[in-house]
Each structure stands twice: as structure tokens, then as C-alpha cells.
Amino acid sequence: MTTSEKVAYLKGLAEGMELTTGDSKEAKVLTAIIDILNDMALDMEDLGEELTELGEQVDEIDEDLADVEDLLYEDDEDEDDEDFDLDDLFEVSCPHCNGDFEVSEEELLADEGIECPICGEKLTFDIEECDGDYACCDEDCDNKE
């Protein structure tokens, strides 16, 4: 039973007891209270409907935002995949401690060299540019003639 139905029931009881038709002060107060309860019940129903509508709008906005996030982050994921490629890592053996570790191409090409993460010795590399000669390239080299 809704609040409006309960107020209507209360109003019917008051009318059945002839409390609303009398001119007494108590009848006037009771009638005013029932009218206020009725107005409050109607306001609550309106608020419930508006809340339901607002919830539906929020759900639609959430779905739209999810679509926008998918579009935005999909591009970022593609860029991240391009920026970090496992083929760009090279395994290096330290001549001092014989420890193996991986470094990026950028670290290998740095003029200041790199520090061995195992023993701490500074390592420098003499990297020659690939000229397309089969001796320095693997089968996947883009510089092959």
C-alpha cells in the first residue's frame, strides 16, 4: 500500500466517523493534518518518479562516458604497444661479473654508457650502424639490400 493510499484510507476513516464535517476545533485540525499528509504523499510520489528518471539519465551518461573512455584509451593502448616493443630489448653480458641483463636500444646507444645492475661497473658499447650487409643483420633487418 502506497503512502497516498494510506492517506486516502485515513481520510475515509475520518469521513466515516464524521470527523471532517463537524465544526469543532478538533475536526478542523484533523482535516488540516489529513490534507497536509495527502500533499506530502503526492510530493513523495513525484520525487520518486523524478529520482527514477534521474537514475536512467545517469545510466545513459555513464554508458556514453564509457564509450568515450574506450575511444580515448584505445588510442593510448595502441601507442603504448608501439612505444614498448620486446624486440627493442637486448640481452647484455657484463664482462666483469658475467651477469646477463636486458637493456633497451636507447640505453645501448647512450654516449655515457650504462651501469651493470649486478656488479655496478660502468659499461660502454661500440655500436656500428647497420649498412645492409648480411654479416651484421639478421633476416628481419629493414636495412638489407
Image: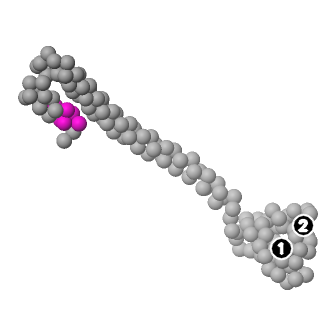
Left or right relative to 34: residue 56: right
Label 1, label 2: how far apart the Cα atoms are = 13 Å
Residue at 78%, 76% (x, y): give it: 101
Q: Amino acid at mark 2?
A: Gly
Q: Quadrant of residue 116?
A: bottom right
- Looking at the rendered structure, the kind of residue marked 1 is Pro
Query: Which span is picked out in magenta?
Result: 3-8
Q: Nearer the viewer, residue 75 or 129?
A: 75
Q: Quadrant of residue 84?
A: bottom right
Q: Position of residue 104 (x, y in %)?
A: 77, 66
Could you tell me residue 52's position as x and y percent?
33, 39
Q: Secondary structure at mark 1?
A: loop
Label 1 sits on residue: 117
Q: Residues within 10 Å of mark 2 (few under 14, many from 20)?
A: some
Provide the residue designation for mark 2: 113
Q: Position of residue 92 (x, y in %)?
A: 81, 76
Residue, x 19% and y 32% (percent of image)? 7
Magenta span has 53? no
- Asked whether the residues under the numbered discs 1 and 2 touch, taking CB atoms below 8 Å apart as contact, a structural biologist would say no
**Is residue 109 toward the left or the right of residue 69 in the image?**
right
Q: Is residue 30 above or below residue 90?
A: above
Q: Answer left or right for 123 relative to 53.
A: right
Helix, strand or loop for the magenta stretch, by majority: helix
Q: Is residue 77 above or below residue 55?
A: below
